[in-house]
Image (cartoon, rainbow, N blue to C red):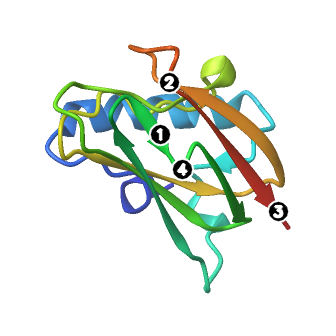
Amino acid sequence: MKIANYLRVRGRPLLWAAVAFLAITASSCGAMDPTSSNPETVKSTSTTHVVEIRQFKFVPETITVEKGDVIIWRNLDVVPHTATSEGAKWDSGNLNNENEWSLVTNVAGKTDYICAYHPTMTGSIIVTE
């Protein structure tokens, strides 16, 4: 499985390994989640969406995407943040200023997520068919 093509944490190669481990662990446990790091699920006409992390908020807070689309979280704050799904099925790991992380969506449904450092920061992903 070539996760490196779909999960990117710029400037943090060791952190990338931890993120890849979490993604593989979640997928091997059979967890059903509207997101995936599985490259086989990327559709040929996928759309890339950006969620900015700024002023201690995910912008937009709720994002609606289609199966196979890519979501990129980009930290514009000066402090580190994470994007961590409910139940920790996926986790961006530490995102410092100007770092970004991406995720491929593969199952229709809704997933809520938070910043592990600042749990009042919340967001939702809605994946449609």
The reply to whether callout 2 and callout 1 are in contact (CB within 8 Å) is yes
Kindly report which numbered mark, 3 or 1, lies closer to the viewer in this rendering.
1
The quadrant holding residue 50 is bottom left
Q: Marks 4 and 3: in contact by CB < 8 Å?
A: no
10 w.r.t. 70: above or below: above
Is there a contact, CB below 8 Å, between mark 4 and mark 1? yes
User: Counting other residues with Cα less than 10 Å from the Cα at mark 1, is it few (<14), some (14-19), or many (20 or more)?
Assistant: many
The secondary structure type at the circle numbered 2 is loop
- Alpha-carbon distance for marks 4 and 1? 6 Å
- Element class at badge 3: strand
| Amino acid tagged 1 | Phe
Q: Which residue is mark 2?
A: 121
Question: Residue under circle 4?
Answer: 60
Residue 87, placed above or below residue 102: above
Q: Residue furthest front?
A: 55
Task: Tell me which residue sits at (82%, 62%) in the image.
Answer: 128
- Mark 4 vs mark 2, CA separation in Å: 12 Å
Instruction: Residue 99: give x, y in percent of width and height.
Output: 23, 45
Q: Which residue is mark 1?
A: 58
Q: Residues within 10 Å of mark 4 (few under 14, many from 20)?
A: some
Which one is in front, 2 or 19?
19
Say which residue appears at 65% left-offset and 77% top-offset.
Answer: 43
